[in-house]
Amino acid sequence: MSSTSAARLSRLLALVPWLYAHDGVTIDEASRHFGVSPAQLEKDLWLLILCGLPGYGPDQLIDIQFWGTDARIHVIDPQALERPLRLSGDESAALLIALRLLAQVPGGHDRGALLSAMEKLQQAVGGSAPDDSVVIDSGTADEVVQAIDTALAGQAALRIRYSGSARDAITDREVEPIAVRTVNGRAYLEAWCRLAGAVRTFRVDRIQQAAVLDRIPDREQAREQARETSTSDQSPDADDLLATARLPQGVMAEILVHESARWALDVYPMEAVAEQADGGVVARILVRDPQWLVRLVLSLRGLVVVLAPDALRDAVGAAAEAALQGYDEPSTPRPEGT
Amino acid sequence: MSGTRIERTERLLDLLLCLVATSRPVSRATIRSVVPGYDSAPSESAFERMFERDKDELRGMGIPIETVLDSGGDVEGYRAARDWALTEVQLTAEELAVIAIAASVWDEAVLADPARNALRKLESVQPDPVRMSHSVAGVRLHAQDAALLPLLASLRESRMVSFDYRAANGEEVTRRQVDPWGVVARDGHWYLVGHDRDRSQVRVFRLSRIQGTVTVTAQPQANPAPSGTDIGSLVGQMSAELQARATVRVRAGAAAGLRGRQSVDPFADAEIEVTAATQGQLVGRICAAGEGAIAVSPTDLVQEVVITLRTIRDQHRGQVHR
């Protein structure tokens, strides 16, 4: 429940030590750093020099010079304010939790600085730091993060065990890492996949194991390929299309969505084209990998039916039939030429 | 100075300086006569109100103001605790740069403001950070759940919390009293793990299902986590959300989604246990694995899987008649 006075006081208490540590900055620079207008910052300075320690004589007031042709700010006497307020519990928690998340993301950032920053912060806030009671689970094992870091830093290849989504299959493959990117808060490893003979993008949290292999002989080919494809395949909905062969333009399928599965319209890249009398809707969906659509339809338990194209219709029917074989179902031969 | 109405911010700052300047407690009478701004109070009670409000405001900002009692138990005066200011932290430019990235991780969520304020404080005593290009800069933590802040506070202070909770499968909202053990971020959701006092059991709560505000009670934590408890692993195992279970036979190399993070050899056929919030969801996940998975038990679930697969097969047979 902080008032406007408290918000302003917070800024003032951060402003004095910052100005003290950055002697000679201009009003413009300071106002930009604190996200206020130059006029507001000047008002803040005028207020500060009225304040001080009891007695309020010339030696007891906060002394700041900010006039003169260059309008540079010099803190002559900060009184007791040369240091900022201690970090509140929320503030230290916010930073420490975020640092812990970063530590779980691979990608060639300065891991040494990250760990020492965490340690110093933890020390600075003493006992109020979150410890075992706050868990950030990025879904990636530490060994995987370290292996990716090592491979990127040493330009080495990796053997990874990948749990693919679209094909629902687990594969071991050798990859030559190019970069780690984050899209919508998720980390992806872009790499030349020796299995596929092409650049693939892997969701880092689906990499179950990773081991560093040999040095990569020549990365030019991978880099070239990455440049060609990197703009097109990072769409937000690409999650389930990754690490699969991508049809660059995809194919548009037509599906019938039952009324009770209409939520799927908001979740998947679908576009409604015709409302049905029973509350259902016919929609179009962009399909880059047929297997992805098959799995989606199977997971929706009969509430979504593929209408076209026939090849995709058949693929769903065949997948359901194949799955039924595991249950002693009498096989029903598909009638020919209907 | 008299005649000029003193701004409240100025009065607060003078009050703070008065309280930090001395290690000896300052009495109310001294504060009233010394700190500019209180002289405008027309009466003793008006001063009391102003002072109480200001003191609360400073404490709300995290400034530790101690009330010192004399030997007779009366209030002698006030002072700021010695650790009111940030202790000396020597950060390198690289460390500060990493902290700056950490401060941007919060996705305009409840902790974005505290993170920014913390960064501002740390920057104020350090050289300017080196601007480095980091691939981690796009990482985001989502914490729209307003419950996170009070829960973190309750964990720091080891206190019981109470809140209204909506069950996963219905509209029913019940009041819960929980001794918090920890919070866990996983798959874009935050969870609270704790001991539910009314049910005398360890429970997992999804923060997005907490209704209204979380009350941090005055009661101290009564059922703390046994030492060595792995809070993170509890979320997967015993979430109250996971009410449906099935045994599923999965083919070698297949059914990656069902296998999840289970440690069985992925390149061998295996029988695994799978859980989900509802049986319907579980059926959907098993069907999605196609021929990669065969439901084994329970019987009613197996039947539902078979019926669902038949329906889907028949729906996709032949040409569409429209």
Image (tube, coloured by chain):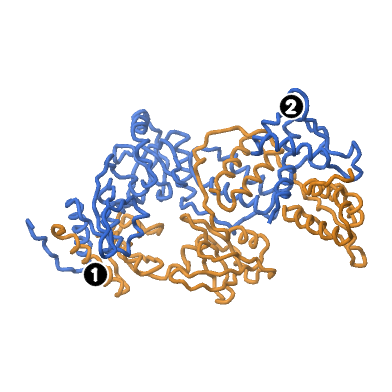
Chain colours: A blue, B orange
- Label 2 marks a residue whose chain is A
What's the residue at 11%, 62% (across, down)?
A333
Please identify the residue farthest to the front as the structure is shown. B3
Contact (Cβ within 8 Å) of mark 1 with mark 2: no
Q: Which mark is residue B307?
A: 1
- Tag 2: amino acid: Ala
Q: Which mark is residue B59?
A: none
What's the residue at 92%, 54% (across, down)?
B30
How many callouts does the rendering have? 2
Q: Would you call the spot at circle 1 few (<14 residues within 10 Å), some (14-19), or many (20 or more)?
A: some
Q: Is residue B234 visible?
A: no
**Residue A305 x, y percent position in the rendering:** 24, 59
Could you say which is closer to the camera, residue A215 or residue B230? Answer: B230
**Residue B28 x, y percent position in the rendering:** 89, 57
- In the visual, does B287 lie left or right of B273? left
- Label 1 marks a residue whose chain is B
Question: In the rendered image, which quarter is residue B304 located in?
Answer: bottom left
Could you say which is closer to the camera, residue A17 or residue B250? Answer: A17
Question: In the rendered image, which quarter is residue B245 located in?
Answer: bottom left
Q: Which mark is residue A71?
A: 2
Q: Quadrant of the N terminus of chain B?
A: top right
